Each structure stands twice: as structure tokens, then as C-alpha cells.
Image (cartoon, rainbow, N blue to C red):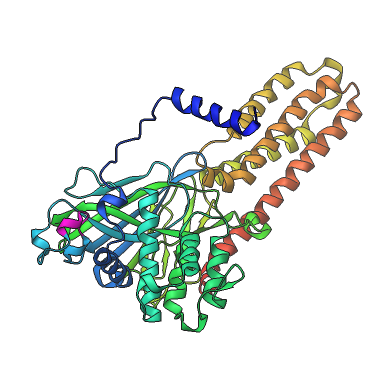
């Protein structure tokens, strides 16, 4: 019996014994049922995305640091969705003449959001109980159709006449490939997909090139809203987790100045009539300034805060996407951790100098000094507990030098308290006391220098941020 015959028999037996797989029922939203490649829908979506500033009145990005290394990013979009029946999710509704006759749900493209997992994703629309979104498969299919139509309009041909390799390139760009951005750059700058010449790159305008590259790193977020939202002003709120670890590198001067600059990505700042950036200041630190790159207006770019302010707000109008992100600068100058470190360091240096100058090391060495050791152990224990980590990550990073300072004070007190027990001779004990007292005094002087540098950094923030 030949090997091929054995294989055929085995396959036949396998098919006969295998239970028929139960295919999941298609929930509302499957692209073959709702025709997401419908030319009417795709054309209206492309026009809507290209005219975001005309129907998106205001966009707000609100950053809220929470616990640990997490925060919450909230997008608020104040918009009036175009009165276009072609936005209908149900294809049978797209042929209606009036948007008021549309029933069910409509598609709303609200923004291009970075391609990444959106943990604890939440959508809220006033007057709407639940707001679903497209699935990933539906999203990619509709976005590829939109991008294909944009290229067809540029070339003056129908979508069906586009080079199949160009369509493959657009699918690659819209998909989740790691090299999607490189493919987008090669296509828009050289007209290449792999080694194939698929389009004359000189025909691709700057707006389409930017749109293509944006879709390589982000995706269009589509919401399914009630049809009553067509032509009506609505407020959409989208939120998800944001990692506060995505910060710029802390330079040594910033560390010395107790300052930390955090870069805040801007979501579609040029796709609205006005853009607003808000930052909630975590407890334990102060916000010295919140700033945006220069837009078409020169007002409202910088927001300096008072020390007791708990949030910062800044706004601008952008005709094109800015080249830089927003910037917030936090400081721990004058914070409870800063004041605590200064107080504990002053107390430590004063007590150790007093013992070194007027203490009796010879008498303590002969008696064992157990009473003094117990007495000095109390502030050492208190300082050690105070140096423990607490608060949000942003506040804790800025308070790190001060927590280290308090911890060193605790260490000096512990060594000082143990010295009468560990050191037998009075001369050696006196030398150890003076060494510890001088170390505390040098630390106190360095703390004063650090505070002065931080104060100068704070005073010169306007000159530094004016160049941003």
C-alpha cells in the first residue's frame, strides 16, 4: 500500500470522526453584512476625515496621573456630526435623502489614535447609554477603503483600477505590522512597495502623504452613535490608561533643580477649531508651567500656575499638526518632601555638632553609652520611616533626592547612636563624632546649594520655555 493511499485514508477517517465546528454567529457589525466598503459610506467618511476642523469644534486632552506608574488619558470632542445619511451603519439607510429619516446607528470618525492596546477603554456620550466601536477587522477594512479612495481621487481613476500592489501596500500600512511606518515612507517618498514601483510619488500631495504616514502609526477611531446625532451638537468622551513612564530623560541639571519635564502626546490637535490641553497635578509636587508648541495664534500657549493649583489648562489653534508634543514641568521645590528634608537635615547637623562639641565621649566610652544610644535611636527610626516611598510615581521621582537625604540622616543617627557601644576608646569615639557631624554639616550646605539652584531654575522658566 502506497504512502499516499495511507494518507488519504487517514484524512478521510479524520474528517469523518471530527465533529462539525460551530461557527460563531455574526454579530451586528460584520463587514460583509453592513458593507463597510460601500462607496457612498467610504466617500462620506473620507470627506468627513478631511474636514475635521469644520465639524469638530473643540478637542481636549486631559492627563490624570493616578497611582503607581499609571494615569488616565481622557479625550473630549465637542462636535457636530455632518448631516449625511451616507454615515448610516445599515446600508439600507444610506440611500435616504434626509438624515432625519435615518434610523439605528451611524458611524462617526472622531480621531486618529496611536496604534497600541487601549486598556480600560471607555466611551461616554451625553444622552447615550452605550457606545460600541468597530472591531479591528472592520476598522482596517473601512480605513483601507478610505485610503484607497483617496489615492484613486489623486490619480483620477476608479478604485478598481488601482494597482493591486498599491492596494497591498495600503493594507500593509493600515495593518498592525511593525514596519508599517517604513512602508508608508517608502510609498509616499519613492512610490515603492518593497522593490516594486507602484505609484509616481510626485503625484502624492503633502496632505495625502501625511495622512498615509499617520495611518501607519495610528488608526481612525470610529464610534457607532445614534442616528439622532447627525447634525446635532454632541460631546464625546473617550478615556483609557496612560503610562506615566513615557517621559523625557531627566538631565542632571533638572535632577539638581528638583524639576521634571514630561512630554504629553497631542491627539489630533489640528483637527479641530481649537485644541485644549489639561494636566492634573499629582499631590506632593507643583506644576510650574504647561505649554504647547506655537500654533496659528500666539496666545494661550503657556500656563503658569500658583503652587496650590491642582490642574493646568492651556489652549491653541493649529492649522497643521505641530512637530512637538505638549510639555509640562513639575517641581518639588517647596513641597512637603523638600521642607521635611531641610528640617531633618538641619536637626541632624545641629544635634551631631552639639554632641561633638560639648559631649563627653570619654565618659560614654567607659560606661558603654547605652542610654545615649537608645535616645538617639528614636530620631533615627523616625527618619527611616519618613524616607519610605509613598505617593504617585511622578511625585516620588521628584522627591527621590529628598527621601535619600532623610534616609542618610537616619543612617547618621544610627551610626552615631551605635558608636558608644561599638567604639571602646574615648579618643576614637570623639573622632567618629566629629566626622559624622562634619558629614551632616556638608550635607546641609549641599542642600542649601541645591535649593538655590532649584529656585534659579524656577525663576528662569519663562526664558527657557519661550524657545519651545
- Within the magenta stretch, is there residue 92? yes
Extreme bottom residue here? 202
Quadrant of res 279: bottom left
Q: Residue at x 66, y 40 (%)?
A: 404
Q: Is residue 170 left or right of residue 342?
A: left
Q: Is residue 251 left or right of residue 33?
A: right
- In the image, residue 101 above or below residue 149: above
Residue 230 x, y percent position in the rendering? 16, 61
Q: Is residue 270 visible?
A: no
Q: Nearer the viewer, residue 211 or 246?
A: 211
- Magenta region: 88-93
Q: Nearer the viewer, residue 29 or 116?
A: 29
Residue 125 x, y percent position in the rendering? 23, 50
Q: Residue at x 48, y 63 (%)?
A: 168
- Within the magenta stretch, is there residue 85? no
Q: Is residue 45 left or right of residue 1?
A: left
Q: Nearer the viewer, residue 426 or 146?
A: 146
Residue 139 x, y percent position in the rendering? 37, 54
Amino acid at each position: 500500500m502506497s504512502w499516499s493511499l495511507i494518507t488519504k485514508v487517514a484524512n478521510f477517517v479524520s474528517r469523518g470522526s471530527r465533529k462539525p465546528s460551530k461557527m460563531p454567529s455574526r454579530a451586528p457589525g460584520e463587514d460583509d453584512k453592513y458593507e463597510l466598503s460601500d462607496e457612498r459610506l467610504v466617500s462620506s467618511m473620507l470627506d468627513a476625515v478631511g474636514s475635521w476642523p469644520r465639524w469638530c469644534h473643540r478637542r481636549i486632552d486631559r492627563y490624570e496621573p493616578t497611582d503607581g506608574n499609571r494615569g488616565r488619558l481622557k479625550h473630549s470632542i465637542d462636535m457636530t456630526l455632518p448631516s449625511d445619511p451616507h454615515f448610516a451603519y445599515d446600508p439600507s439607510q444610506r440611500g435616504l435623502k434626509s438624515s432625519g429619516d435615518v434610523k439605528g446607528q451611524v458611524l462617526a470618525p472622531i480621531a486618529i489614535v496611536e496604534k497600541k492596546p487601549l486598556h480600560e477603554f471607555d466611551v461616554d456620550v451625553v444622552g447615550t447609554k452605550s457606545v460600541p466601536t468597530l472591531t479591528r477587522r472592520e476598522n482596517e477594512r473601512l480605513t483601507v477603503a478610505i485610503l484607497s479612495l483617496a489615492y484613486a481621487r489623486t490619480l483620477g481613476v476608479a478604485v478598481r483600477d488601482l494597482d493591486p500592489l498599491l492596494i497591498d501596500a495600503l493594507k500593509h500600512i493600515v495593518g498592525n505590522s511593525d514596519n508599517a511606518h517604513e512602508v508608508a515612507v517608502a510609498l509616499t517618498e519613492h512610490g515603492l512597495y518593497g522593490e516594486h514601483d507602484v505609484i509616481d510619488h510626485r503625484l502624492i500631495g503633502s496632505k495625502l502623504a501625511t495622512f498615509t504616514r499617520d495611518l501607519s502609526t495610528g488608526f481612525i477611531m470610529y464610534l457607532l452613535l445614534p442616528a439622532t446625532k447627525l447634525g446635532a451638537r454632541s460631546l464625546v468622551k473617550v478615556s483609557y490608561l496612560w503610562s506615566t513612564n513615557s517621559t523625557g530623560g531627566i538631565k542632571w541639571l533638572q535632577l539638581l533643580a528638583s524639576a521634571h519635564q514630561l512630554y504629553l502626546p497631542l491627539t489630533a490637535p489640528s483637527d479641530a477649531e481649537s485644541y485644549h490641553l489639561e494636566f492634573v497635578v499629582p499631590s506632593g509636587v507643583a506644576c510650574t508651567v504647561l505649554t504647547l508648541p506655537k500654533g496659528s495664534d500666539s496666545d494661550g500657549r503657556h500656563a503658569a500656575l500658583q503652587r496650590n493649583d491642582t490642574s493646568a489648562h492651556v489652549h491653541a489653534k493649529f492649522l497643521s499638526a505641530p512637530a512637538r508634543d505638549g510639555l509640562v514641568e513639575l517641581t518639588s521645590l517647596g513641597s512637603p518632601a523638600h521642607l521635611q528634608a531641610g528640617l531633618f537635615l538641619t536637626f541632624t547637623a545641629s544635634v551631631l555638632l552639639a554632641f561633638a562639641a560639648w559631649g563627653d565621649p570619654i565618659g560614654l566610652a567607659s560606661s558603654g553609652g547605652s542610654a545615649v544610644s537608645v535616645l538617639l535611636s528614636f530620631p533615627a527610626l523616625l527618619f527611616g520611616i519618613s524616607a519610605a516611598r509613598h505617593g504617585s510615581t511622578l511625585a516620588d521621582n521628584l522627591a527621590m533626592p529628598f527621601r535619600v537625604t532623610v534616609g542618610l540622616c537616619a543612617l547618621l543617627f544610627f551610626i552615631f547612636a551605635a558608636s558608644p557601644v561599638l567604639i571602646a576608646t574615648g579618643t576614637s569615639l570623639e573622632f567618629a563624632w566629629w566626622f559624622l557631624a562634619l558629614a551632616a554639616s556638608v550635607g546641609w550646605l549641599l542642600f542649601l546649594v541645591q535649593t538655590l539652584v532649584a529656585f534659579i531654575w524656577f525663576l528662569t522658566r519663562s526664558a527657557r520655555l519661550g524657545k519651545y
